[in-house]
Amino acid sequence: MDKTSRGECPPPSYQMSDHARSGQSSPVSAFSRAENLYSEMSRRHSISNEKWGQAAQAAKQGIVIVYSPVPLLQGRALQHWCDRLEAAMLPWLSPLQFGHLQCFGSGEAALKARCSRLLARALLVRLVMAAAHMSQDTQGADETDATKQKSHDPQLAWLSLEGLDMDYLGRPVLPGWRAAFSHSGQVAFCAVRYMGCENKSHQCQQSRNVQESQVQQDFRPCLAVDAESLTSLPPDPRAFSSKELNAPIAKNFQDRDALRRWTIKEALLKSAGLGLSRDPALVHSGFSGQRRGLMQFCREGSTFFSSGKNYPGAAEPCRQIGWQLVPCAGHWLCVAAPVHPGSALVVSGRPLRAHWRCIFQGLVESAGAD
């Protein structure tokens, strides 16, 4: 069997053309290479659009995770990239979101953090765009103008007019969608769930009004995601209960299991809207090797606590939050969200990886179509 039939590249020919001998490339071959490169880029772009469409469709059935590695750039190159991505994202951000992104300094670590947060928001906008395209195709609309397209999709129209907003807890606000961000330092993550039309009494309905939020949303769990790189240092032992610390696990895997448990704890606390304002040791992360589970979060006065079952003395009904670890290369990745009693959290498929260049290209093309 020759190398070509095995899928390998055949050895190069050593017969040199006149152009090769003179150090010049043939105009015909140069044109052919350019044409092939353009065809390959078009093919990849088409595949990318198809994958985004599939992810948008899956978001109607369950939670979808999209992620992008942070560019391996430094110094001025990273600063230039952040500025370009921010300029492309500007039409889609509310003043609150834009102000949040301006809080980062100019140091190397701050630039990487800013870039990761820009990427996470760009991932969400890109998915909403894909959903709008699919909605337009489904309705059989023949308009291709971007302005007409926005009129067909209320979420994209709202996003283009109001911009991606945030509630008083810093969670992203986009009517009809649930979204959450996480950053491992190496990768930006976005968890998304399409909700469609919903009323304001929904227990996870987020509001931009601070006073209304404080009155109505003090205890409204929502979608959350947390990601930890497997190369991260293990958390402080004080973050775990004695039962978790004494779990039967090989010594060589204790650090990795501690990261797994920490990822679950942080996702649950984020979903409950408590963050690290509560002792993570009080949040049980399940048994060794557990990949999914349920947790009850109850409230008594101003005190929040986690419980394995409903607490009879709680002033309000306990909220049930489901969690699930999702496979992702080089990371522990956990999604958490409120679920109805007796139901489980639904995560649609494996995470979709997107390259930052493709994300930027999609945003620029959309802006150019306006």
Image: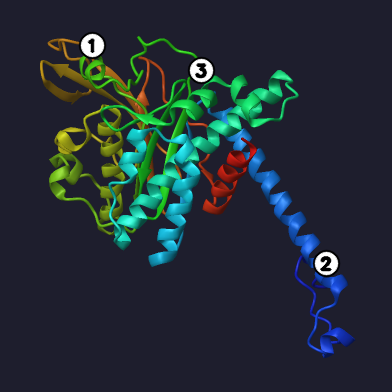
Give the alpha-carbon distance from disc 1 to disc 3, as whole Å. Answer: 26 Å
The quarter in which the C terminus is drawn is: top right
In screen coordinates, is 295 left or right of 366?
left
Measured as percent of width and height from the top left, residue 324 is found at 39, 34
240, 86: nearer the viewer = 86
Disc 2 residue crowd, few under 14, some 14–19, many 20+, Cα 10 Å: few
Is residue 264 visible to the viewer in this orientation of the structure? yes
Q: Earlier in the sequence, mark 1 or mark 3?
A: 3
Q: Which residue type does callout 1 highlight?
A: Pro
Residue shown at the point (39%, 32%) measured from the top left: 94
Residue 322, compared with residue 367, is above or below; it is above
Identify the secondary structure beneath mark 1: loop
Q: Identify residue for label 1.
A: 317
Q: Nearer the viewer, mark 1 or mark 3?
A: 3
The kind of residue on which mark 3 rests is: Gly
User: Residue pushed farthest bottom?
Assistant: 21
Q: Residue beneath label 2, please?
A: 31
- Of discs 1 and 2, which sits in the foreground? 2
Asked if the residue under mark 3 is in contact with the one under mark 1, i.e. CB atoms within 8 Å, the reply is no
Mark nearer the N terminus (1 vs 2)? 2
Instruction: Find out whether the residues at labels 1 and 2 contact each other: C-beta distance under 8 Å.
Output: no
- Depth check, mark 3 against mark 2: the one in front is 2
The disc placed on residue 89 is: none
Residue 63 lies, in percent from the top left, at 47, 30
Q: Residue at x 25, y 19 (%)?
A: 213
- Tell which of 337 and 309 is nearer to you: 337
Q: Is residue 182 above or below residue 254?
A: above
Residue 352 picture quarter? top right
Question: For the residue carrying disc 3, how many other residues have a C-alpha within 10 Å: few (<14), some (14-19), or many (20+)?
Answer: few
Element type at mark 3: loop
Q: Which mark is residue 196?
A: 3
**Camera-side residue: 354 or 350?**
354
